[in-house]
Amino acid sequence: MRRNSFTFPVSSLAGTTPGMIFKILKHHSVEPRYYLKLALSFIVATIFSLFKLFEDLLWRKRINNYTLKEPPIFIIGFNRSGTTLLHNLLCQDPKAGYTTTLQTVFPHCCLSQKGWLAPVANFLVPEKRPFDNVQMNMGFPQEEEFALANLQPHSVYNFFVFPKDFNRIIDQEYFPASMPEKDLIRWKTEYKRMVTKSLFNVKGERYISKNPQNLPRTALLQELFPGSHFIFIYRDPYIVVESMYNFILAIFPGIQLQKIPSDFSRKDVVRFYAIAMKSYFDLKENPDAPEILEIKTEDFMKDKINGLRNIYSFFGLDGFEQVLPAFESYLAEHSAIPHETNNIHPETIQFVNQYASDIVTRFGYPLRKS
């Protein structure tokens, strides 16, 4: 029987390397109550570093020599905007390649060790995510930012491990321009290797990315993967902020190495959301911006099949009719999953109206009264 708890004896740093842990800790402190958790994470990372050496020996040359067959598709909507469902659906295409949950946790050895590691990891994680009841499995598509956080030191998702540094991390690690040049070069290298590993891992041809943190990175992604396609999916900002706040609070206990600060609130999430949306609006005004397909989640949910058909048509992708039965099968199987509540806390309404009312109206949603 799989466990129900979303707390673990180690942090997510267990999936990186000892050297990377030291680099990350140069910028963040660990509270004494979490010293044992850090020590266990360091031990696991050390053990898995041996598997990393083995995987590098077997796969490095093939990864370095690989050329993508098709441009990737990047889903860049903000967290909790409907990105997971859209990602899961697009990954039903047999040509799709994606980063699995196992790869995000153990990105250094997902190719050579998945035969035994995936079943063990599946046993250790809950069957469903505690914040939205979506099924969890090490082989399912996952957001690759979690893998990137284990491959190099710069990621907004470091705030899950270090919640006291939430706002500082957003200010210093969200935009690529804030990264030192040598770290930016490493980030590019690791991203390309991660994508190639993903394609090898699931035997895909077209990489499908779901990563909200790619919003300010579109120029980098165009540079790395010429001809890339981008989908921006958006949703009622009040629901997004409320959902993101609850999502963050659900993740913190599982991997944190700092206590959640008493003043952490929905205001911090609204601030993050506003920064991200300003980044997107600035992108749209850039004459060098890629062509982006915008999808309103509420419209997509009314007719998912036609929404998918429009994606294939917009980007000139072939094979929609052949994949249609797989889309329909997935939707039929997951139709009974309960949706998260749309109850909005008064604080969310207050802070969204105060700091992001222009975003609400720009997306065409009505302003709510607290």
Image (cartoon, rainbow, N blue to C red):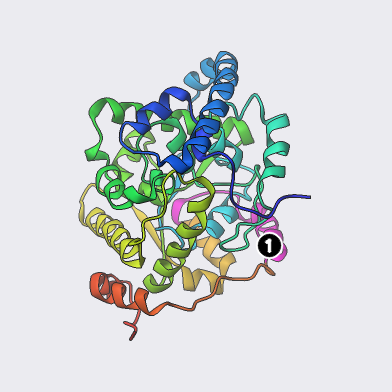
- Residue 184 lies, in percent from the top left, at 29, 31
Q: Report the span colored magenta.
A: 314-334
- Residue 356 lies, in percent from the top left, at 27, 70
Q: Which class describes the residues within 10 Å of circle 1: few (<14), some (14-19), or many (20+)?
A: some
Q: How many marks?
A: 1
In this orientation, which residue lies closer to the viewer: 218 or 82? 82
- Residue 339 lies, in percent from the top left, at 59, 71
Q: In this rendering, does residue 17 appear at all?
A: yes
Q: Quadrant of residue 226?
A: top left
Whether the magenta-drawn stretch holds residue 60 is answered as: no
Element assignment for label 1: helix
- Residue 104 lies, in percent from the top left, at 53, 39
- The vertical placement of 13 against 125, above or below, is above
Q: Is residue 288 left or right of residue 301?
A: left
Q: Is residue 351 left or right of residue 21?
A: left
Residue at 48 percent across and 79 percent down: it is 343
Prevailing SS of the magenta stretch = helix
Residue furthest to the bottom in view is 369
Q: In this rendering, does residue 68 appear at all?
A: no
In this orientation, which residue lies closer to the viewer: 161 or 232? 161
- The vertical placement of 67 against 221, above or below, is above
The C terminus is located in which quarter? bottom left
Q: Is residue 319 left or right of residue 150?
A: right
Residue at 59 percent across and 56 percent down: it is 89
Q: Is residue 137 left or right of residue 162?
A: right
Residue furthest to the right in view is 1
Residue at 49 percent across and 32 percent down: it is 194
- The vertical placement of 248 against 332, above or below, is above
Query: What residue type is disc 1 on?
Result: Glu
Residue at the disc numbered 1: 328
Q: Quadrant of residue 221?
A: top left
